[in-house]
Image (cartoon, rainbow, N blue to C red):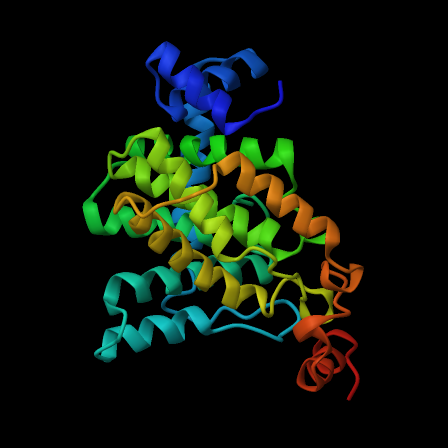
Amino acid sequence: MKHTFEKFKQQAKEENKELWEIVLGEEIESYGTTKEEIWKRLQKSLDVMKESSHNALDKKVVSVTGMTGGNAKSMRDYFLGEDTILGQTANNAMAMAFSTSEVNASMGKIVASPTAGSAGILPASIMTMMEKYGYDDDKLIKAILTAVAIGDVIADNATFAGAEGGCQAECGSAAAMAAAAICYLRGCDIETQGNAASIALINIMGLICDPVGGMVEFPCNLRNAFGVINALSSAEMAMAKVSVLVTFDETIEAMKRVGDKLDVNLRETGEGGIAVCESSIKMRKKYIDKEL
């Protein structure tokens, strides 16, 4: 069955269910398993998210190439010692997004949500909500299932792959999933969750994928930190009832059209955008090509 957000909304209305309940039912049917078994698997994923989003906050975690590392700790040290513009919540969220990104680049354990390159956004968003509002694991797992619903719609109608759709398909999708999950946690209805997801995608429509040396490190780590801010701000806008003039399904269709039009050099080949700046080429030669 091809998922659309409109179908999810109709089913939710007809069956008086939330998005997470619909996704849970589909999982039980697809895998022929029980709610308890699915919950057990999701708990493992949540535990990995907790760990990856905190592992690099107090120590410098360096990537396998040596090209990146330490941004999570720098961000953490900054907001603990300064009167920051955005405040502790936003800065801590960015630090946690950096953390998972750095754990990924160092070959640590992460949850690809939906991809490894964008894996810092959903965990940082969920952990931010947990730390700010005290949600328990049961509630957080329901938020993850809400994010899965958004991911299902994107996967069935567009793509998660930077090689196909640019970074809008990776960090954009992750931010959309996270924004909907945040709205669920705040008790918002499905319409608001979908609006938040739409805003998150609209905010970075057309974002290219241009990793230095083809490695999922830079500027990917920066975009993970921005991605969690995108998710949080998109959720806030949706909850504030800011007008969203296109549906989530239409936004996904637009993202696919844009991704299809992106030149191949702007889709994870490392041959466009930031990847071909002089400084980036020097980094690639030093850390990837290992030229002295």
- Where 192 falls versus 85 (above or below)? above
Q: Residue 40 location in percent, x, y?
A: 42, 26
Decide if residue 92 is on the left or right side of residue 6.
left
Q: Residue 179 location in percent, x, y?
A: 39, 45
- The residue closer to the viewer here, 57 or 244, is 244
- Where 285 falls versus 196 (above or below)? below
Q: Residue 218 location in percent, x, y?
A: 60, 70
Question: In percent of the image, x 77 and y 89: which residue is there?
Answer: 292
The image quadrant where one finds the N terminus is top right
Decide if residue 23 is on the left or right side of residue 191.
right
Judged from this view, the residue extending furthest toward the bottom is 292
Judged from this view, the residue extending furthest toward the front is 245
Q: In the figure, residue 191 lies in which quadrant?
A: top left
- Where 108 falls versus 284 (above or below)? above
Residue 116 visible in the current orientation? no
Q: In the figure, residue 216 lies in which quadrant?
A: bottom right
Q: Residue 247 location in percent, x, y?
A: 47, 37
Say how many tags the image has.
0
Question: In percent of the image, x 46 and y 22: which residue is there?
Answer: 8
Question: In percent of the image, x 37 and y 37: which residue is there?
Answer: 193
Residue 249 visible in the current orientation? yes
Decide if residue 7 is on the left or right side of residue 58.
right
